Image (cartoon, rainbow, N blue to C red):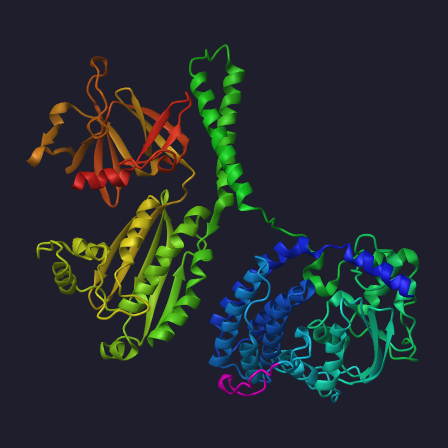
Amino acid sequence: MGELMNEGTNLGNDFDLTQFYAIFFEEAGENLDQMEQMLLAVDVNAADDEELNAIFRCAHSIKGGAATFGFADVAELTHQMESLLDKLRRHELKPTAAMVDVLLESSDALRGLLGRHQTGGGEGPSNHELVARIYALANGGDATSAPQPVAPAASAPAVTAAPIVQAVAELVVDTAPVAPVAPATPGGMPAARPSQGERQLDIHIGPLASLAMADGIAELFRDIPGLGQIERQSTEGDTHRIFHVRTSASDADLMDLFTFHVGKDQIRLQVSGEAAPAAEGADFGFFEGAPGVPPEAAAAAAQASAPGQALPAGEAAPAGATAPATPATTATTAAKPDQRAGGASAGLESTTLRVSVSKVDQLINLVGELVITQAMLAQKSRDLEPSVNQALLAGLADLDRNTRDLQEAVMSIRMIPMSVVFNRFPRMLRDLASKLGKKVELVTHGEATELDKGLVEKITDPLTHLIRNSCDHGIELPADRRAKGKNETGTITLSATHQGGSILIEVRDDGRGLSREKLLTKAREKGIDAPDSMSDAEVWGLIFAPGFSTAAEVTDVSGRGVGMDVVKKNITALGGTVEIDSAEGYGMRVSVRLPLTLAIMDGMSVRVSDEVYILPLASVIESFQIKPKEINTVAQGARVVKVREEFMPVIELEQVFQVPRFEHNGNSPIMVVIEADGSRVALMVDELLGQQQVVIKNLESNYRKVPNVSGATILGDGKVALILDTSGLVRRSRH
């Protein structure tokens, strides 16, 4: 029998679990995000049963994966969270704000623990104090009266620390014999867990690197009342131990307890008196349906490990029970996935595919090169005779259409919803408002609005600062709001909408707003020229000056004046703009406008002398021909043109970029009206070459930053064309 066990162990150890680490960490992160959102939405005065069940399932999923991969610290903490959540969903305890706080704190601790395991850092600092607080709340106490964790004995191995025993003691109390199941609660959950009665059980532990690890199992029976008692012990070889126990705990609860000390694949439970499944070829380390496992062995292992399936010694199967399966039937059964792991969705096909970001970036680069090649072919085809090359030109037209469709499809892969950014703010705002003693509600709109992944990552920090700024400087204290006739709970609204080829993100609050007089006074103290004749928009723009702050005192939240200037700098670097609107006493609005993507765009090609420039098509309003006499010169040599009763500044691109003008070029007879930052200007160009898709290449990383230029692209003939920064040109006209 020992030989069979060793052979089974070798088979099991050949199954490398590390290949599933990436999936576990990703799914654990998703579960933590979902759990945190639901905790923030819980109404402690009227908690919804389905919400509590969903939160419990998130913690349970993380614990199950952590126990499987041997992350004992994660399993220990999530186990205690489970115990508290289980009592909440069964209405044995009433939710309180302290419970939500400790569960959110546990969520943060789990992120740290999982991060350490993911980077190979191993177990981090002890969470025994947090475990003890959850334990106290789960047993009707409060977090401040939590028992201090007991230090492990010096002679005991590290894995048998007493705090773990204390942490799991509550779960075992539920497994003691109880009366028949009480009626279901209004939420549909039973008020008490059913017991399967006292029974004789053989617990096989092994193979063990050290027999001292099995001592932790013995300590559980010695230290936890109601778990049962060990009647005798035996050994098999040097690394296997068998505990012959009498217990009323279920197989599932015993496995939960034992996996704090030894791996789940090292434990096998067998009702005393039954034939050992190992003799049939099943042993430690087998997964149901695992590669290389004999069908009969896999079925036997699955039956032995299924909770509640073992029959007490000497008890016959109930009448009408299914007869033992034939080998063919057993093989079919073993091939099915574990229903406990997959739940109701185990038979559903996956509708998503996890792909590395680097692969998507590579795909986008290849599509960009394809766009350039297609543009080259389209340009060369203009010289072909249509009547002779009709089939070729039709194929090139199809290539043009398919290339555009492919580009849009590939770009949509990188587009992710703004909810990815928005979802991190409720928790941050909750903690910040609590720290400042304020009541703040966050309202979001347009979470489904999509933005390029690269921009989402870079816009998160500026938005974080804007929201912190609204909470700290904008929203008043509850008493001040009541005195002004406002609701004591302030509102911060975060919205995202598509506008043409851009995305508009707004952060609004109903707080005190900006004070014009205060800003002007502060600016003059800092030596900034701030005459009273400044418009409101110019006064609001003062807060973007480096080191500018209106805070009365410096706190650890804000007030050092190192935020808004960085916000504007970062947004401008992304090709975006930021504007402020405010009304004193009513609130403030910050509008951030960004391009949808930084990879490929539609552009308008224009020629100035022998140079070709690209204008972002989203910024182009109209174009028209003019005569030189229609351009007027005003003060300081500035030139304007009248367009439908409106005078627009004129920008001559040949002067901006010092383009040499030759005799054969003539003068620029065409005006192109562009709009940016809410203003319009007219650009003088020689010729409109047409509309085309262009692949944006970062000029700053390949050369250096050039004023009034946002990037470059490669044309169909292989030449490089500059993509103009329309915002920079509009700002130039203002100056």
x, y (%) of residue 184? 66, 82
Magenta segment's dominant SS is loop
x, y (%) of residue 666? 20, 17
Residue at image position (34%, 60%) is 465
Left or right of 129 on screen, residue 562: left
x, y (%) of residue 178? 74, 88
> What's the magenta region?
139-151
Q: Quadrant of the N terminus?
A: bottom right
Residue at image position (62%, 51%) is 351
Q: Is residue 450 above or below residue 146?
A: above
Left or right of 543 on screen, residue 592: right
Q: Nearer the viewer, residue 582 or 715?
A: 715
Q: Nearer the viewer, residue 187 or 350?
A: 350
Magenta segment includes 695: no
Q: Is residue 352 above or below residue 512?
A: above
Left or right of 319 on screen, residue 693: left
Give residue 77's quadrant in the image: bottom right
**Residue 438 can be seen in this image:** no
Give residue 304's quadrant in the image: bottom right
Given the current orientation, which residue lies at the most extreme left position? Answer: 635
**Residue 524 can be seen in this image:** yes
Q: Nearer the viewer, residue 618 or 263?
A: 263
